[in-house]
Amino acid sequence: MKIRSWIKAKLIGIDFNALGVAGVELDFLMSHVPSNSLVMEIGCGYGQTTRRFAEKGNKVYAIDPFLPHKDSKLLMGENPDKIKEKFFNHLCDEILQEKVIFYNKTSENALKHYDGTKLDFIFIDGEHSYKALEIDIKWLEHLKEGGLVAFHDCTLPEVNDFLVKHVFPKYEFIGSRESTFIFRKGGRRK
Ligand SMILES: C[S@@+](CC[C@H](N)C(=O)[O-])C[C@H]1O[C@@H](n2cnc3c(N)ncnc32)[C@H](O)[C@@H]1O
């Protein structure tokens, strides 16, 4: 995040850890998100990306447990109740119109209750730990062949390590911008 955005976020009382994708990264991400499709977002925070996905005519499943988390290096908000409130204010219309379906659960618990409908696009931006990613990656069983998966904060050591071990060898690398990396399912690297 740029220093100006960080200062602005601080001034208006927004927790910058939960802010997520912005600037060129957001443009890059959005240029790969399909329209009128089914999108899954793991870790929706304030709902900035959730909203952008829904604006493309997608139905968005948004997962976030909004739980307190002490480990600030994992880039999560320190006051989840406030973030949750802002998420609902921000996405009130989309939730009412069922363009956004919110699961107030961890990625792991949402996965247990998921009906198995195939997804067109998955965005992984939840708990950025190696252990959590081992669960998040299981969502790719529900991604269509040829569908894309994007990861955020890939420059964090645990995320980077996970991608190198489990994602690069199995999925086709499409490209990256800053800390956002995109892969395709079904394009096994030679
Ligand atoms: C950086 S924020 C997401 C920002 C959002 N994607 C954006 O770009 O606007 C990370 C979010 O992941 C959520 N989170 C933490 N652990 C999670 C888990 N196990 N499953 C799903 N989400 C989780 C946090 O509550 C936090 O709101």
Image (cartoon, rainbow, N blue to C red):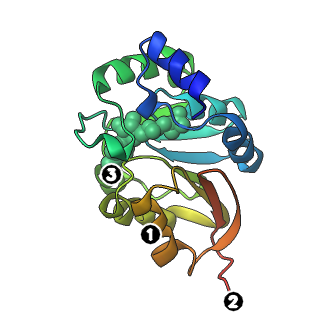
Task: Work out whether mark 2 precedes mark 3 in sequence or the reverse, and give the earlier one.
Answer: 3
Answer yes or no: is residue 64 visible: no
CB of mark 2 within 8 Å of CB of mark 1? no
Give ligand 1's quarter of the image. top left
In the picture, measured across the screen, residue 188 lies left or right of residue 130, that is: right
Task: Work out whether mark 1 precedes mark 3 in sequence or the reverse, and give the earlier one.
Answer: 3
In the picture, measured across the screen, residue 124 lies left or right of residue 144, that is: left
Dot 2 amino acid type: Lys
In the picture, measured across the screen, residue 95 lies left or right of residue 138, that is: right
Q: Nearer the viewer, mark 1 or mark 3?
A: 1
Alpha carbon distance from label 2 to label 3: 35 Å
Say which residue label 1 marks. Answer: 161
Q: Nearer the viewer, mark 2 or mark 1?
A: 1
Q: Residue at x 60, y 28 (%)?
A: 51
Residue at the outermost top position: 12
How many residues crowd mark 3 within 10 Å: few (<14), some (14–19), many (20+)?
Answer: few
Residue at the outermost front position: 3
Q: Which mark is residue 113?
A: 3
Assign a secondary structure to mark 3.
helix
Q: Nearer the viewer, mark 2 or mark 3?
A: 2
Q: Residue at x 77, y 46 (%)?
A: 31
Assign a secondary structure to mark 2.
loop
* Quarter occupied by residue 43: top left
Residue at the outermost bottom position: 190
Say which residue label 2 marks. Answer: 190
- Residue 74 pos. (x, y %): 35, 46
Dot 1 amino acid type: Asp
Task: Work out whether mark 2 precedes mark 1 in sequence or the reverse, and give the earlier one.
Answer: 1
